[in-house]
Amino acid sequence: MENNNHSAARGALIVLEGLDRSGKTSQSSKLLSYLEGLGYPVESWRFPDRETAVGKMISSYLTNQSQLDDRTIHLLFSANRWEKRSLMEAKLKSGTSLIVDRYSYSGVAFSSAKGLDIDWCKAPEMGLLAPDLVVYLDILPEKAAERGGYGGERYEQLEFQKNVAQYYKMLSDASWKTVNACLPMEDIEKQLKEMVLDCVMSCQKGKPVSQLWLS
Ligand code: NYM
Ligand code: MG
């Protein structure tokens, strides 16, 4: 592997968002190898992080092994991001970029789609680290459902995903980059690589780390 010693400057916080089966996880791993290959320090993260104690509660809820009130699970998803915040900040400051599969936007979109008040859903996310780039993998819910493999977890249902898509639309702003998730995988990969490299380079030039504000 090349070592271009890119590590002096800060890393970039790159978030991939989209419905279930939109291809986020596959693209995350491609981006990880791409940036590693260029010699950038990089890690791939995902939320929920099911490894922590909070993450285990979330996982058991998602797999229908436990029942939780809608607000309770919402706050657990948020707590699962908060418990990783200081590590996230340390990684970015030490020059490691993070490719993150889902973040606060999933938190707000999925819980709002259940009928919770959107502003109530946004509140606990305020003060987490703001992403430097949000890429939305855009797919029609019907197309995502055709991909099959909805694994029987909670939320993996067409009608619900349609609702989630609407909330993602409400949350998106002009800074988001949208990629058509129905293109061939290689085309998506190519677009993502360009966006991500741009972002990593602008963070290296000293773009400050900022805090999340959802308006
Ligand atoms: N999800 C994910 C939420 O409802 N709120 C959140 O804050 C996050 C991060 O969990 N259907 C939902 C979206 C997914 C599910 O995610 C599990 P994944 O990426 O399938 O492990
Ligand atoms: Mg899933």
Image (tube, rainbow, N blue to C red):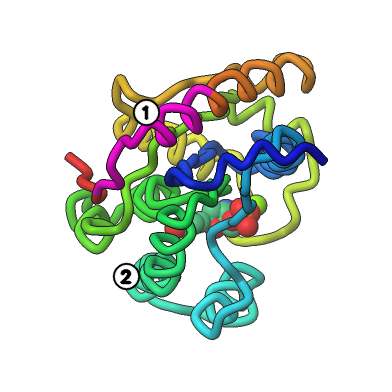
Corner quadrant of residue 52 = bottom right
Task: Report ligand 1 position as a quadrant.
Answer: bottom right
Mark-to-mark CA distance, 2 and 1:
22 Å
Which residue is pictured at 70% across the width and 42% down the height?
A: 32
**Residue 9 magenta-highlighted:** no
The percent position of residue 185, horizontal first and vertical second, equals: 78, 22
> Callout 1: helix, strand or loop?
helix
The percent position of residue 145, horizontal first and vertical second, equals: 70, 35
> Callout 2: helix, strand or loop?
helix
The percent position of residue 78, horizontal first and vertical second, equals: 37, 66
Name the side, left or right, on which 21 lies relative to 92. Answer: right
Query: Which residues make up the magenta segment?
Result: 198-210
Residue under label 2: 71
Residue under label 1: 169
**Residue 21 seen from this side:** no
Q: Where 2 sits versus 187, above or below?
A: below
Name the side, left or right, on which 118 lies relative to 175. Answer: left
Which residue is pictured at 68% across the width and 25% down the height?
A: 143
Which residue is pictured at 32% across the width and 70% down the height?
A: 71
Which badge, 2 or 1, is on the more N-terminal residue?
2
The quadrant in which the C terminus is found is top left
The amino acid sitting under disc 1 is Lys
Of 212 and 117, the residue lying toward us: 212
Please tell me how many numbered marks the rendered image carries: 2
Which residue is pictured at 62% across the width and 48% down the height?
A: 41
Check the image and name the residue furthest to the bottom. 53
Corner quadrant of residue 56 = bottom right
The amino acid sitting under disc 2 is Arg
**Residue 205 magenta-highlighted:** yes
Circle 1 packing at 10 Å, graded few (<14), some (14-19), many (20+), is few
